[in-house]
Image (spheres, rainbow, N blue to C red):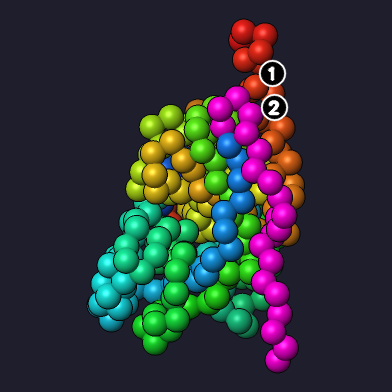
Amino acid sequence: MPNLIAKSALFGQAPLTLGGVTLAEAPLGEMFSVAGQGKALDKALGKLGLVMPAPNSCAVGTGGVIVWTGRDQAFLLGDGSTLAEVAAVTDQSDGWAHLTLEGDFVAVLARLVPVDLRGFGVGQALRVGLGHMQAVIFCTAAARADLLVFRSMARTAWDEIAHAMQHLAARRVVGL
Amino acid sequence: MRLTCPLCGPRDRREFYYSGSADYLTRPATDDAAGWDNHLHLRDNPAGETRDLWYHETGCAQWLLVTRDTVTHVISKVELVAK
């Protein structure tokens, strides 16, 4: 197997700052889908400083970030290979695009997401539509949202979010 | 219209895909030809409480069993199909 060059979905894309909000692509990292339940899984997750997250939640541990993504399913942003014996684990690293929105992300996402995000904060996660895409949105730090979309949708997601940011910035210019 | 997904909470209708009657959850016996005809083609059309299947497409990807009233449009119950 030759040594392949790993590239993120939006490789080379510079961050975009408009109206005090910054859209950027997160650095390429490992991501695993972890599906399962039970004591063995809880114990293995415990070694990473994590637990299987409750619906609509996420948490940060020594082994990475874990995000709820479905019934008995979570995404581990970190090395999930140690869980392979106790859960259905698949490497999703190259299947998703990871974007971050820093600043007043609520106003931007309100234009794209059919969920009221006011009050969305640290420790929360959502599986939700972003425009016509399926997305995972989670929050591990104040005034910052992390978004996961299918890698094939990366450019579309960037475009739609950038448009929403432009509209909001334009409204600000004319005092709306 | 909103459905309260047992996992995700209250969500907009556009996140869901409508599949059809909850009758699809109960299959007739393999050799029951009349039962299959009924299962595939014959549906009640009640004015009142009805139960149908919805898929939370842009959410948790779960099948939901929704009990609603076709007269008042009240959605009285949303349950996970999976146990």
- Closer to us: A68 or A145: A145
Q: Magenta: predominant secondary structure element?
A: loop
Q: Does the magenta stretch include residue B58?
A: no
Q: Give the range drawn in magenta.
A: A1-21
Classify A36 as above or below A19: below
Query: Residue at left 67%, top 9%?
Result: A174
Asked if marks 1 and 2 touch (Cβ < 8 Å), the reply is yes
Chain under label 2? A
Chain under label 1? A
**Quadrant occupied by the C terminus of chain A:** top right
Task: Count neighbours of disc 2 (C-alpha within 10 A) and say few if under 14, some if 14 to 19, many if 20 or more.
Answer: some
Query: Residue at left 35%, top 48%?
Result: A123
The residue beneath circle 1 is A170
- Lateral position of residue A161 relative to residue A52, left or right: right
Q: Where is residue A102 in the image (x, y as percent from the top left)?
A: 51, 38
Q: Where is residue B8 in the image (x, y as percent from the top left)?
A: 44, 48
Amino acid tagged 1: Ala
The residue beneath circle 2 is A166
Mark 1: secondary structure: helix
- Closer to us: B61 or A125: A125
